[in-house]
Image (tube, rainbow, N blue to C red):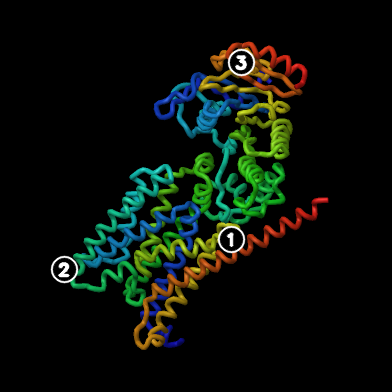
Amino acid sequence: MFAFLSSQPVQTALIVGSCAALVSALIGVFTVLRGNAFAGHALADVSSAGGAASFLWGISPLLGFLGMAWIAAFGMEFLGVRKARERDLATGIVLGAGLGFSALFLYLDVTTTSTTGAAVSVMFGSLFAISRGLIWPAILAVLAVFLLVGLFYRPLILTAVDPDLATLRGVSPRWMGLLQLLVLGLAVAVCALAIGAVLATALLIGPAGAAIRLSRRPAQAIFWAMIIALTAVWLGIWMAYESYYWFSGNAWPVSFFVVVLIFLFYLLAMLGSSWQHKYQRRGITSLRRLQEP
Amino acid sequence: MTNQSPILAVADLSVDLGGRSILRDVSFDLYPGQLCALIGENGAGKTTLLRTLLGLITQRAGTVLIGGAPAREHRELVGYVPQKINFDPDLPLRTRDLVRLGLDGQRLGLPFFNGRTRYAVDQALQAVGAEDFADQRVGELSGGQQQRAVIAHALVRKPRLLILDEPLANLDFGSANALVDLLGRLIVQQKMTVLVTAHDMNPLIPVMDRLVYLVDGRAATGTVAEVVQAEVLSKLYGYPVSILHHGGRILVLPDAPENADVANMNRCAGHGV
């Protein structure tokens, strides 16, 4: 255990991984509440183009992921989306275009800079290989997300409940939608850095989806999402580290363990909530039976 | 009543949506303590009229004044209960939280515990009889309970004008009567003005003072006795109709093509058939 914690890549992985877990749990709850899971997934996928470009131009991958996620967010908002079907359509079109750029940049990475690991690292992450210089930018991104969500907490929830009710309270659903996409972009960048652009969705949606089934209040859902996400990330890092010994020197990637753990937690939450529902329903019917003469 | 200023004044309102004329020259005033039913069939323009009053749609012509000012400037005077909100059963939001959002949902910062807020929320929950499910998730409630939760959300700021879109649709008789009761209490005890849309006026007859009858974008307004008359409604429909009174209920029926059976129907109604 001491060797595990004293290793510098492990320390970096734990810090950046925790950042990703906290930020994704927080914004994930709002994303799931608004039924925006597909948009979240698309932002994450498209951000891979930025990650790939950052290798090419030698800039910080966090900035690369973030820049592309924001461009995609504006693109989706700009393509004008009122109905759910149009929103899915616009999201899908932006997603397709973004992945095209990703393909181009990854190809150029391999041919011009001979960084062969770029594709795997951008798409699926390599938490143990993150440079220490990215710790502070990641923490700053997390602070920005917490500040913005904390500030607009109630308007965001009200908009998620019903846009008309929000408008009548003087909240603009349009601005809240844009704010949410921008904050989502920040969260996506940190997640993509940690477990890869393609797998970022798992961290964004999974813990929030599981927590929502277990909670009765938004704050409670955010709390449980954070617990689930942190547990998955910490356990995943530890298992990946230990897997070096399990598979005789062939350590498996962190991202794999994190994603599998999140999936397991989601299954558990589903079982838990369906058991809870069954129990409650039985309680109600027995009460009815009592009331009947 | 007449020396008071109207809480809602609608004058010559015309609304177009997508190039189509939805409302034409609608005018009516509502005073404090009045309950007005907005009656019309599906597609008559009821929801469009409500959304225009709320400032969610901009009119082509005419004015809407709420408390003497344009609708958008006086939103705090208005409480709105939409026809149906689809609450996901998994939505982590208690009835109590939904009601609180009606009070401070526009505020910045985190919703910390606050005694005065808690009191206002409890009052609103009590007013609609929602104390029993105050701590349950909104998505788990029955349709009638969800409606009461949304009414509490609208009432918690103590609006002077409460607007409800088809509140009686999808309610069983018991819940519908309870709702009519609640609306009656609001206008009498709190001098609130209530505007309700419905496609059937009958359940509202015991409590309503005024009627706006919408047909095809045009409106007749007045008291029930003034509006629900064969001549007025026939002109509005552009087709002869008859009014049947039966046991305190009013039915509007289009005349049969030859006009021959109508006399027969009136006779039947007279005999309580």
Dot 1 crowding, Cα within 10 Å, few <14, some 14–19, many 20+? many
Residue occupying the point 77% across, 18% down? B271
Dot 3 crowding, Cα within 10 Å, few <14, some 14–19, many 20+? some
- Residue B194's place in the image compared with A219, above or below, is above
- Residue A246's place in the image compared with A140, above or below, is below
Q: Position of residue A188 (x, y in %)?
A: 38, 61
Is residue A49 toward the left or the right of residue B42 in the image? left
Residue occupying the point 62% across, 56% down? B113
Tags 2 and 3 on a common chain: no
Q: Which residue is labeled 3 in the image?
A: B255
Q: Position of residue B110 (x, y in %)?
A: 54, 55
Decide: marks 1, 2 in contact (CB < 8 A)? no
Marking on residue B96: none
Residue occupying the point 47% across, 32% down? B57
Decide: marks 1, 3 in contact (CB < 8 A)? no
Q: CA distance from mark 1 to mark 3?
A: 57 Å
Q: Position of residue A196 (x, y in %)?
A: 35, 68
Q: CA distance from mark 2 to mark 3?
A: 83 Å
Tags 1 and 2 on a common chain: yes
**Which residue type carries mark 2?**
Thr
| Foreground residue among A102 and A60 | A102
**Residue A115 seen:** yes
Q: Which residue is labeled 2 in the image?
A: A112
Determine the secondary structure under disc 1. Answer: loop
Q: What chain does badge 3 belong to?
A: B
Q: Which residue is labeled 1 in the image?
A: A215
Q: What chain does badge 2 belong to?
A: A
Q: Name the outermost residue toward the left.
A: A112
- Residue B99's place in the image compared with A238, above or below, is above
Is residue A88 toward the left or the right of residue A108 in the image? right
